[in-house]
Structures are given as structure tokens and as C-alpha cells.
Image (tube, rainbow, N blue to C red):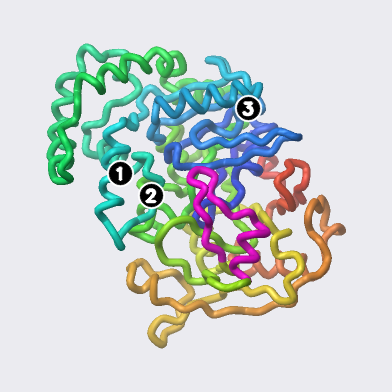
Amino acid sequence: MANVTVIGAQWGDEGKGKIVDWLASRADAVVRFQGGHNAGHTLVVGDQTYKLSLLPSGIVTGTLSIVGNGVVLDPWHLKAEIEKLEGQGVEITTENFAIADNCPLILPLHRDLDGLRETAAGAGKIGTTGRGIGPAYEDKVGRRAIRVCDLAHLDALDAQLDRLCAHHDALRAGFGQPPVDRAALLAELREIAPFVLQYAQPVWKRLKKVRKAGARILFEGAQGVLLDVDHGTYPFVTSSNTVSGTAASGSGLGPNATGFVLGIVKAYTTRVGSGPFPTELEDETGQRLGERGHEFGTVTGRKRRCGWFDAVLVRQSCAISGVTGIALTKLDVLDGFETVKICTGYRLRGKILDYFPSHAADQAAVEPIYEEMEGWSGTTAGARSWADLPAQAIKYIQRVQELIETPVALVSTSPEREDTILVRDPFDD
């Protein structure tokens, strides 16, 4: 059976939740492999709307859902999210949910540091969600993280706390804050430990068993490739690798397990937070895209910046992540525009570029080169076949796949699971 890896091919917020939910209904296991509760997925199933930020989207359908070791886990948020979903009638048990026991934890001190840094940065703010994701990843690579498995050994945590507090106390002092209250932190961990540990296990072993049985595994990415800590618009990025290759290291399965790589691509471009955005529209058109697309962050509620489709960025994302095919979402937002534009290249100080440069100053200075196309007056909302689409909308889709050098596997025409035009089934690869 083919496995599928789903990633965002822009700056996140591409509509991954609906696509993952659609795929999860036919998967045997869904795995989150990076990020934390800074991800935001909105699922619409029938008359119910579910907002997830940490749990894999498969949990809503009862599919085995796994939080892999590449995720940084806030145990208190986990409990709150599970309780909220259970209140909506979702059943979450040790049979359908598991957490990697080697997941690093996000602690209150990480949230503190995140907020202190952003406040002090002034104009240099990165625009984080303030949820402690970055500081938690720093402690992971700094080899001072407290992990899920440590919750079962809290009486033997002194040496780890010494390393952790030596680092954080110095940082806190620089911000005029008191040292970490170790006793209070331990008390909080003791209280939450039983709840988290019931789901903890070596998930690589469970996934190996699932794979050996020939089951379908869906790897669910968070954020987008343009927020990747290596390949994104650094430093305005997240603190993990968001590319498809991380599915292997972030789950405990090898790279040959990732299967069909589906890149989720919005029919225009949006971005939350700070950082370069070549096709951003700060005019009536940008406002229209935002209003029609309901462009507000699932996690933060922040208004998303909007602009025309940037084929250069998406082509780069698809190449870096080895995307097999794309899922084009929110096409209906472009309904009614007399003309639509696609960015096909950049001008940078007199030179023409067919890629997005790495340096922040160059990224901020590039000017988009646009190709203009005739729009369409008919509606694409709710379309389930090519025959339901206006001719110009089909031409737009065809031009997009030509420019990004990656075929369209499916087109999403509304938040509803059934409103999807399937060109190529990722699971039938």
C-alpha cells in the first residue's frame, strides 16, 4: 500500500486540514512529525467544525493518530485540546492515540522566554505564536530538554533540571526576571504526568508494526515549506524542518516510508506574521482576497496578509520537498475577478531571478514579474468535476501546474470534504 506525506508548499494556512481529513478517512494511521501547537487545522465534517493545533487530523475520524518524536509537546495544551474534542463527541483512547515517548516537552519557561524575546525585539519581531515552540526546539538541540519519557522519572530529574535552569536562569536574568521556580515546575509536571504517560510509547515500534501489516500511513506536516528553518524565509521561519524529508526523522520510520508527497497549495498566497512577501497586495484586491477567503490564523486569530499566486516560491517548495503532486485549494476565492495574476519571476537590482534568494535583504528587495490572465465570472465553489468549472478557471489551474513544474493531483473547491476534484489519488500510487 502507498503511504502519503502531506506538506504545505507556501507559508502554511493552505487548507491542509480539510485535505488531511479527506485522506485520513482512508488511512490506517496519521502521524504528526514536526512543529507543535503552533499549527492550526480547521476541519469541517458535516455540521461540526473542529479546530486542531496539536492532535493529528485523523483523530476526528477515529483513525490511529500519532504524535511523532519530531513534535515539541505542550502537555497542558494536549490535555485541554483532548478535553475540548471529547466535548464535541470525539472519542480519544490509548487505542487510537499515541505520543512518542522521546518527544521534547514545551514548558512554561519556554512560553515565558518566547514572549520576553518578542517584546524586546521591537521592529525585529519574527512574529511567533508566543507558544514556546522555538525555545523548546533550542533546548532539544542543546541537549537539555525534558522529554515525555522523563515524566515517569521525575524523582531523578535533578541533573537535567540543573542543565536546563543554568541556561534559562541566565537568560531570564538578562530580561530582569527571577530564576526558574524548580519546585513549582516539578509540581506542575507531577500533576500532568499521569495524563500524558497513558498515551506514551515508542511509536516507531508501533508504526513499524502498522507498516509491516501493509496499512496506509498518512504523514501530516504543519506550517509550510517557506517556514522551514533551513529552506524558508530565514529568520522569519518556524524552528523545525517542515519539508517532507522530516517525516522520516520525525516519526522513526525511514525515508522510503514517506511515499506520495502531496503539497497543499492555495490558489493565491497568504502569510501570517512578519517577513518578506513579494506578491503581497496592500490594496482593495488584497482586502477582497482576505475577506472572501476568511483569512485569519486558526491558532492566533491574526489577520493573514494576502497576495497573488507566486509560482516561483511554489516551484521552489515543490523541488525542495520532492512533491509528487499538489492539492490546489480555495480556488473559489478567485471567482468574479476580471483578471488574475501569477508571479513568474523576480527583478532584483536589474537582474531577473527564477528563484527566491536566501539572503533576507534580497528577499525583501525582489519585485514580482506578473503574468496576467482573464478571470471568470462563474462560480467554482462546490465543484466536484472539471465539467463544473468555468473554462478560464481550468486554464488558470493548467497554467499553475506548468509554472510550478508539478502536476495537480486534486482541487479543493470548499471546506466540505466532498467538494473535491480528484485527478490522481495519492493512495493509489
Indicate the quadrant where residue 59 lies.
top right
- Residue 248 visible in image: no
Left or right, residue 195 beside residue 335? left
Q: Which residues are magenta?
A: 285-306
Dot 1: element: helix
Residue visible at 50% across and 43% down in the picture: 299
- Specify which label sits upstream in the sequence, 1 or 2: 1
- Residue at the disc numbered 3: 28
Asked whether, in this view, residue 197 is left or right of residue 115, the answer is right
Name the spot of residue 40 as percent of width and height, x first. 53, 42
Q: Is residue 21 above or below residue 353?
A: above
Q: Is residue 355 above or below residue 216?
A: below
Indicate the amino acid at tag 1: Asp
Kind of residue at badge 3: Asp
Q: Is residue 166 visible from the viewing direction of this image?
A: yes
Quadrant position of residue 268:
bottom right
Compared to residue 276, the image places residue 185 above or below, namely above
Q: CA distance from mark 2 to mark 3?
A: 33 Å
Left or right: 181 with respect to 375? left
Res. 152 mark: none
Quadrant the C terminus occupies = top right
Q: Which mark is residue 128?
A: 2
* Mark found first going from the N terminus, 2 or 3: 3
- Tell me the element at label 2: loop
- Per the model, the C-alpha gap separating discs 1 and 2 is 8 Å
Instruction: Please state, as top left, top right, bottom left or bottom right, where the N terminus lies in the image.
Output: top right
- Residue at image position (35%, 59%) is 234
Which residue matches tag 1? Answer: 114
Inspect the image, locate mark 2, and give the three-letter code of the amino acid beneath it.
Thr
Residue at 42% over, 84% down: 351
